Amino acid sequence: MSFKRYLIGKPLANERLDHERLNKKTALAVLSSDAISSVAYATDQILFVLGGAIGLAAVQYVFPISAVIVGLLVLVGISYQQTIHAYPGGGGSYTVAKENLGQRAGLIAAAALLTDYILTVAVSVSSGVAAITSAYPALVPHTVAIGVTAILVLMFVNLRGVRESGIAFSIPTYAFIVMMLALIGLGLWKLSNGVTPVAAIAAINVDPTTAKHGAFPAGYGLLFLLMRGFAEGCAAMTGTEAISNGVQAFRAPTQRNAAVTLSWMVAILATFFLGVSYMAHQFAVMPTTAETVLSQLGHHIFGGGIAYYALQYSTFAILVLAANTAFADFPRLAGILANDKYMPSQLAARGDRLAFSNGIISLALVAILLVWLFNGDTNNLIPLYAIGVFVCFTLSQAGMVMHWLRTKEEGWRWRAALNGIGACATAVVSVIQVVTKFSAGAWIVALIIPLFILILQSIHTHYRRFAIDIAFRGRSPILPHEHTVVVPISAVNKATAAALVYATTLSRNVRAIHIEVDPNATPKLEREWDRWDIGYELEILSSPYRSIVRPLVEYVTHLQEETPGALVTVVTPEMVPRHWWEHLLHNKTALYIRTAFLFKPNVVVVAVPYLVGHDYEHEERGPRWTAEASVTTGEVPAAKEPD
Amino acid sequence: MSFKRYLIGKPLANERLDHERLNKKTALAVLSSDAISSVAYATDQILFVLGGAIGLAAVQYVFPISAVIVGLLVLVGISYQQTIHAYPGGGGSYTVAKENLGQRAGLIAAAALLTDYILTVAVSVSSGVAAITSAYPALVPHTVAIGVTAILVLMFVNLRGVRESGIAFSIPTYAFIVMMLALIGLGLWKLSNGVTPVAAIAAINVDPTTAKHGAFPAGYGLLFLLMRGFAEGCAAMTGTEAISNGVQAFRAPTQRNAAVTLSWMVAILATFFLGVSYMAHQFAVMPTTAETVLSQLGHHIFGGGIAYYALQYSTFAILVLAANTAFADFPRLAGILANDKYMPSQLAARGDRLAFSNGIISLALVAILLVWLFNGDTNNLIPLYAIGVFVCFTLSQAGMVMHWLRTKEEGWRWRAALNGIGACATAVVSVIQVVTKFSAGAWIVALIIPLFILILQSIHTHYRRFAIDIAFRGRSPILPHEHTVVVPISAVNKATAAALVYATTLSRNVRAIHIEVDPNATPKLEREWDRWDIGYELEILSSPYRSIVRPLVEYVTHLQEETPGALVTVVTPEMVPRHWWEHLLHNKTALYIRTAFLFKPNVVVVAVPYLVGHDYEHEERGPRWTAEASVTTGEVPAAKEPD
């Protein structure tokens, strides 16, 4: 417990939940790390896929493909400006789809979002680790270990529920922005002074396993390849929806500030993505499994040194922030789904530090599993990524079209048209995503999203049925006719005495029974019982198969058949030893008895704890169970309270 | 459960415990597999140790060393004849040492025995696997897997509690005896027709890592080496005590039959051991990590073919039987120790099939761990072996000396002298064992045996203290002054209603409380509560830190302080869903509450199970908790039984 306190911190009260509003600059840092950090891997993925088929010729296609993606980005950005105005309380895809397209569309969006949040953590952390291992190749064998450590650190930080502190987010984000501007600016200046391609180095660096220089594809083959490259590059667009989800975090004028910040973010992302792809083309950079495009550009343009390391560290930092975004979003969405009864109710509970602890831990575990299964390699994970994002883009914008058609607000026609164009474009891209990447891993996501929907629906069915099952119709229930208390006695000692005395306070009808596992021990017990003289007969039940539980269950079943409508309570002593290891030295009979009766209706099992070594005789706050007083023998203590 | 039935079989009644008496031939098969099977590894170990230092010259020493061991074997055999006469009920080392030398000596014997039973399983199984891999070298990489499988099969066979069926034991034992006689007979015949040493092959086969042909040792160095070889060869004597332990298994005249069988066993073991060592000398056989001495002799004398494979299979079979002996002895001794309160009481409980299930499982797990840690290599395990056996020989015979001095039976003088000589000889060997093998692994045993004794004593101390703590002095205890029942209510539903109704049957003093985690939900609950109108106030406890348990514990503590001497029962509903996975969808609040109060004296927690989906309204055998009846509102149902 105290170790938990040290790691997580003291509990926080509910009032601490209201949070500060952010200005535009801070909001940009907090909400756009996921989007902007994509430039660390998007260009790489285009080149990696193309290079695998056509080698160095790939660099000719990277800029045009990036330009198409940026066009799509601007379209989606404009589309989300509408969402900001329509949903000032935050328009997540689940909310927008559910409200406008129905619960089923909402569930698809939810499943796609949950999948993508998990992948955001895995991809961003893997890519961040790649930024570090590019700078320090000696660390390559420890990729998985570094990735897992990073996820665990994120998990603990989020369990502590650290506020989204402006400075913690601003420093890495703006550091990355500065380094990227420096890289692109210096790169353009170098280019204006004549090109010195990296190709010579890159040609050696091309991974021979992926770069099979076969026949150069043409016609449909080339088209499919370019589409695949486009689909992989679309990973650049993940995170675009973050600002429209988090409108309520902005200072007044809320909507206008959010809209302006969204424009900034799109502009920055577009500039960086085009800039990196252009540099990659001009300098003929090919990513390898050991070094990223950004790292190669950094080496080439900055020529190593402090600037290069600053670029790599800031890349790592912003990618970790991107993963952190998922650590905020996944548990929040899981909590919303839990409140809507689509996820286990535990996910809706805020922990000691007001964070959705169970969601955070679940996300971390699944992400660690992914990083471990895919060897922490961004190239392996990316084909799974971005599919869910585009499904959400489509549902969210389609939902907005319905919204405008329904509300008919001012300018609804052109607004609906804009969202409609966005929805169609992203729908087409969703199909391209699944088709071109299917064999590379998209099939996993194509399986997981429907499976997720199925699980969400089964959970919902369970809770609905459960609510009906336990609904109480509001009048007083009748009382049980009779209450029989059964006390299994293994020996006469303070613990069984305590149980028996407790039993006498519950009912007049107490049955003390002994289940005879070892017939040789019975006479001694009977002598002790007679000496005790508590006033009850001790019934002996034989147990030829040495089981305690079976004869007891049969006895109780027989009691219930004898007097239908009777309530039966089984009172067992439960030894609580001084130290945990002493538990190993005692049978868990009380536990077995409880388990055996758990599924039998109208039987209640009471374990009366006896604290071994506790000084009951000098106990101030309770009855002295074991004190020796002379109660007239034979007379059953009748009343439950001595009035 | 049905899977367990399939693996283990139906429960057996206590009466099945009496077992058949054995005739001499069957008893020899049942009781001597451990001893006789030792010839499969004893000669190997002498050669392995000597060969590692002096190479092929080792074969010159193997026969003299074996002869000394056989002399010791005969001495111990005669000594144990005395035990048979003194302890017709079975004279295990623990019993003999405890009765004659005191509890402390008994504990040393017990610790040494337990250690050696574990090693018997590990060594016999490893050696048996070596017999198989010698015949099929392709299986060498699977040594550990085969060994672990063999131990698991032994575990399940013993959990089924298969009777010590004569035939199952006789076939492998007598097959091995026949094959060994054939091997030695044919070997002698071949020798009389001129020797063709295996040396040429063996020289190649000698494992270069162990055969460091350095300077030939002389003086003390050679003496120490020969002592070490002697110590390793003493593994041949393990199992000699089996017949004197199991006297009661013999048919009448019990003691005479046992004594004769012991003589047979010693004679067979002596013949085989001397025979194998003589052959090894004459044919200049050196064991390798890949092929045993017996296998090499088999190849050389039988020339391969059916006879060779029959030898290997029967060797494997008798070694598995030897391991099986430990599976009978370890749990039996653990059970005796548990009855004497030196081991956890669970080890004294016979399972469904009358076997000491917990002891069998523990032994199998530890033996598997050993085989895995030591790579299933007999050569690695043997240095740990036989130490415990000689400690037991010593204690047992020393105990017999005391026995004769005390009883002064007929011939007590020469009997005491015989046992005394045996005790001295085995004491010396014990010291040689520890000293010569110390760095090779004996230090592990030298640590484990004292640790075992310490554990046995701590367990005993716990049980003794526990017995004092819970001892009840035989008069009726006084009743608690007052009984307050607290029912935490999270919502009004059938489960909480059942809990509340149950609470009213326990005491008039019922407190319904609601722990307010989400203040927004309270008004709805209060409305539902008023509509129900059960007649109790609903107290609202605020919980700013969202914990259910902490405010409840504080409330109960406060109650106990308010009315000292009061007994408090907390009644919680416990949802029992239809399917196990549905548990994952509900909070385990009932469990948390029980755990929180487990260490608080004078508080009893009652979980009233509510079987979700169970048709309580048409339940025949119990009260209809949830039926709607009109009880006059405001009136508290008072009586615990409506008489």
Image (cartoon, coloured by chain):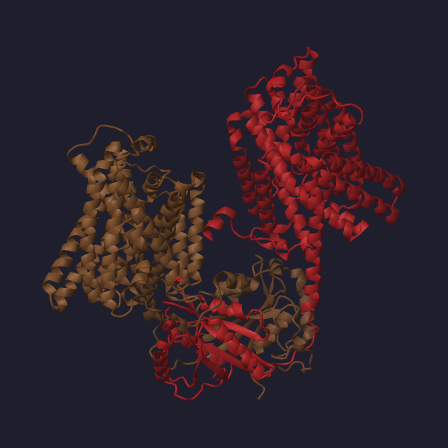
Chain colours: A brown, B red
Find residue A17 and report its image quarter. Answer: bottom left
Q: How many marks?
A: 0
Q: Is B89 located above or below residue B588 in the figure?
A: above
In the image as oriented, which residue stretches furthest toward the left?
Answer: A413
Check the image and report above or below for B161 versus B565: above
Seen from the viewer's position, the closer of residues B525 and A404 is A404
Residue projecting furthest to the front: A193
Q: What residue is shown at x 21% (from left), y 30% (from top)?
A: A216
Pick the front one: B371 or B114: B371
User: Measured from the top left, where is residue A454 in percent x and y?
Assistant: 29, 56
**Residue at point 18%, 35% (across, down):** A222
At horizontal 25% and vertical 57% (from top left) the residue drawn is A264
User: Is residue A132 found left or right of A1 in the rendered image?
Assistant: left
Question: As drawn, which residue projects farthest toward the top?
Answer: B194
Is any atom of residue B19 visible in this view? no
| Res A506 quadrant in image | bottom right
Where is residue B233 shown, x and y percent of the image?
71, 30
Toward which corner of the image does residue B267 lie, by quadrant?
top right
Q: Position of residue A525 (x, y in %)?
A: 67, 67
Vertical relation: B189 (above or below) A407 = above
Q: Is residue A494 left or right of residue A463?
A: right
Residue A383 drawn above or below residue A13: above
Residue B84: x and y in percent read 77, 42
Whether residue B557 is visible, yes or no, is yes
For the residue pair B522 and A324, the one nearer the viewer reads as A324
Q: Residue at x 54, y 44 (%)?
A: B156
Q: Could you say which is closer to the camera, residue A621 or residue A574?
A: A621
Does A541 sit left or right of A117 as displayed? right
